[in-house]
Image (cartoon, helix red, strand yellow):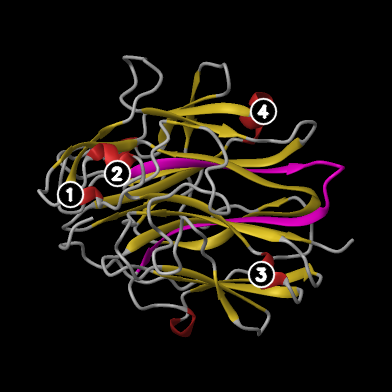
């Protein structure tokens, strides 16, 4: 993402959870297949059940050649060196050896043995304008292959966020894939044919996918699991004081409860500081969600991690994903005194980002 990037608005979010279980929530108008430049965050799914949340994720495009004399070599960036996608010529990742797909990546989904999938949703998105311009008509379609299976077409089933300006052309789409994941289960999932542009530009190429899955398992604790999505621009210097928050109410987490929170964000650069994620339980102190791989002031730094670790197999497995983030953080410090509400605050780096998904799991009292 280069210096010409224009800030794309702010994020003003307020969501509230009910106490009922296993509730999928329809996306806001306009209907499926339509596009909107801004999609406010809404609750997509929530449940109180024995079980939890897992996810699989990967970026779909990586660096092929350095375009700046100051840029780290592609090989170093793939191993985690700092670098912005605007410094490289970007090219599709391809792992399926299928000549009929122009990008394909895999990631491991760790659904516990004997668990039942209660809900699964696939999110994908990227930049349509880099060295080439991709047609937006293809935004709402990807190919998905379950472990050991063949590709199946998946179509977006709700509004697609799509925002274009002089610098870039960004979108996110999603679809309910619960029946597919119930059948396919744990293992390596492949997602192909994401509508993203390759090449080089001041904004840079980026794109990827994340599969978020809620499951039930009788031997696990009772937990509240919830998924939100939308498509919002994040600007520098925002935060809770400016109303750029997501608030979850109706929780019943006791003192010492454990939990986790994950997000999907687009176009964040490793080494460009200013972006952050914070959480406040009830009216207590605000805590930064960060770890060894995601510093508090560079949390959207092109990583795919869980609690600071690379906890599942990806193909390819770049450590700097050059504009794609799908991270999970430990919520336990925010829950040390219990919580009836959690308020998440997001800020963007100086050149802005997009926020697409937030998913949260917390212990619940019986």
Mark 2 or mark 3: whose residue is earlier in sequence: 2
Left or right of residue 116, residue 219 in this image = right
Q: Quadrant of the N terminus?
A: bottom left
Q: Are marks 2 and 1 in contact (CB under 8 Å)?
A: yes
Badge 4 marks a residue whose secondary structure is loop
The spot of residue 214 in percent (x, y) is: 68, 45
Gap between marks 3 and 1, in whole Å? 37 Å
At x 31%, y 60%, the residue is 271
Q: Earlier in the sequence, mark 4 or mark 3?
A: 4
Q: Is residue 279 above or below residue 160?
A: below
| N-terminal label among 4 and 2 | 2
Which mark is in front, 4 or 1?
Answer: 1
Q: Which residue is mark 4?
A: 185
Query: Which residue is pictured at 66% across the width and 56% down the height?
Result: 226
- Residues under labels 4 and 1: Cα distance? 41 Å
Provide the residue span drawn in magenta.
Answer: 206-234
Residue located beneath label 3 in the image: 333
Mark 1 neighbour class, 10 Å CA radius: few under 14, some 14 to 19, many 20 or more: some
Q: Main secondary structure of the magenta part?
A: strand
Element at label 1: loop
Q: Nearer the N terminus, badge 4 or badge 1?
A: 1
Mark 2–mark 1 Cα distance, whole angstroms, equals 9 Å
């Amino acid at each position: 993402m280069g210096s010409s990037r224009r800030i794309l608005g702010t994020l003003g979010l307020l969501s509230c959870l009910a106490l009922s279980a296993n509730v999928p929530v329809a996306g806001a108008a306009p209907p499926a297949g339509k596009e909107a430049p801004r999609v406010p965050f809404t609750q997509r799914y929530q449940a109180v059940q024995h079980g939890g949340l897992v996810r699989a994720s990967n970026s779909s495009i990586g660096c092929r050649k350095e375009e700046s004399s100051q840029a780290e070599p592609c090989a170093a960036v793939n191993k985690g060196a700092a670098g912005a996608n605007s410094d490289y010529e970007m090219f599709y990742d391809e792992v399926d050896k299928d000549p009929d797909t122009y990008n394909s990546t895999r990631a491991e989904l760790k659904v516990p043995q004997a668990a039942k999938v209660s809900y699964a949703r696939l999110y994908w998105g990227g930049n349509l304008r880099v060295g080439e311009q991709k047609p937006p008509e293809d935004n709402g379609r990807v190919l998905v292959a379950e472990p050991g299976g063949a590709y199946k077409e998946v179509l977006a089933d709700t509004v697609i966020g799509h925002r274009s300006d002089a610098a870039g052309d960004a979108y996110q789409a999603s679809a309910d894939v619960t029946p597919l994941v119930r059948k396919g289960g744990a293992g390596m999932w492949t997602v192909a044919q994401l509508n993203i542009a390759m090449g080089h530009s001041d904004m840079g190429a980026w794109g990827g996918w994340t599969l978020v899955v809620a499951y039930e398992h009788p031997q696990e604790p009772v937990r509240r699991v919830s998924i939100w999505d939308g498509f919002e621009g994040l600007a520098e210097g925002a935060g809770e004081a400016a109303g750029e928050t997501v608030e979850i109410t109706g929780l019943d987490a006791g003192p010492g409860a454990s939990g986790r929170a994950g997000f999907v964000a687009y176009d964040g650069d490793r080494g460009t500081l200013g972006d952050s994620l914070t959480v406040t339980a009830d009216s207590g102190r605000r805590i930064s969600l960060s770890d060894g791989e995601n510093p508090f002031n560079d949390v959207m730094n092109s990583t795919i991690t869980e609690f600071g670790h690379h906890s599942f197999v990806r193909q390819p497995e770049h450590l700097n994903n050059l504009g794609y983030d799908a991270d999970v953080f430990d919520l336990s410090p925010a829950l040390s005194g219990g919580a009836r509400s959690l308020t998440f605050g997001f800020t963007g780096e100086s050149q802005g980002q997009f926020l697409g998904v937030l998913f949260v799991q917390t212990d619940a009292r019986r």
